[in-house]
Amino acid sequence: MGKLRLTFKTDYGEVTIEGDSLQDFKGTLSEMGISDLDIESIVNTITGRIERHDVIVKIPITVSPSKPELAGVIEYGSDGVPHITVSPDKLTAREVVGLLLYAKSPNAISMGELTQLVVNNWKNVEMPYISSNLNQMRAYVIKEGARGSYSYKLSGSGRSWIENELLPKLSMKSGST
């Protein structure tokens, strides 16, 4: 797997291009029959969108999961940030939150960090949406800390749900696609 991954959503599904450098991406696009002018347009559009939104893009470098059961579901960037590799369309908000809490365990994480991880891995959602999902998951989540500075981690039943139900389900889906 390359160091860089770019996924396009199209009407007929997702197209993913991987490479070790921007030149690899350009080469792959060229091999697909895309003109040099269109390739430059694609690169400029992506760069422009990133700059307009003041988004810092961290390209994940594949690091083997410290939890072997996460292989094929979550990869970690060189900075230790988890990246869910399963298509966002196949996951519910609760599943994304559970996977991210599991990936960060045994450490608890703040609402702000959890929200940012969900946005980076799933959909653009706000804190109240994450809070609502955590509330629905209260049997699976432990809330620590004082009001206004809570942090969250999976309970024993939450870990069990991820390990015994969710990961096997996702492994079956990724194996059948």
Image: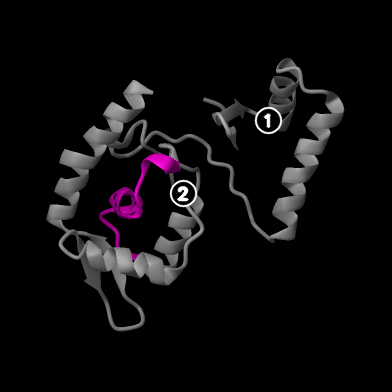
Front one among 92 and 116 = 92
Task: Name the residue furthest bottom.
Answer: 147
User: Is residue 24 toward the left or the right of residue 66 in the image?
Assistant: right
Measure the alpha-carbon separation of dots 2 and 1: 22 Å
Residue 1: tell me if it is visible.
yes
Q: Nearer the viewer, residue 71 or 172?
A: 172
Residue 89 inside the magenta-drawn segment = yes
Q: Amino acid at mark 2?
A: Asn
Point 49% across, 49% down: residue: 79
Q: Residue at x 70, y 52 (%)?
A: 50
* Residue 21 marker: 1
Q: Nearer the viewer, mark 2 or mark 1?
A: 2
Q: Is residue 159 magenta?
A: no
Question: What is the tally of numbered marks visible in this picture?
Answer: 2
Residue corresponding to mark 2:
121
Asked where in the image residue 111 lies, by quadrant, the reply is: bottom left
- Quarter assignment of residue 15: top right
2 or 1: tag closer to the N-terminus: 1
Q: Main secondary structure of the magenta part?
A: helix
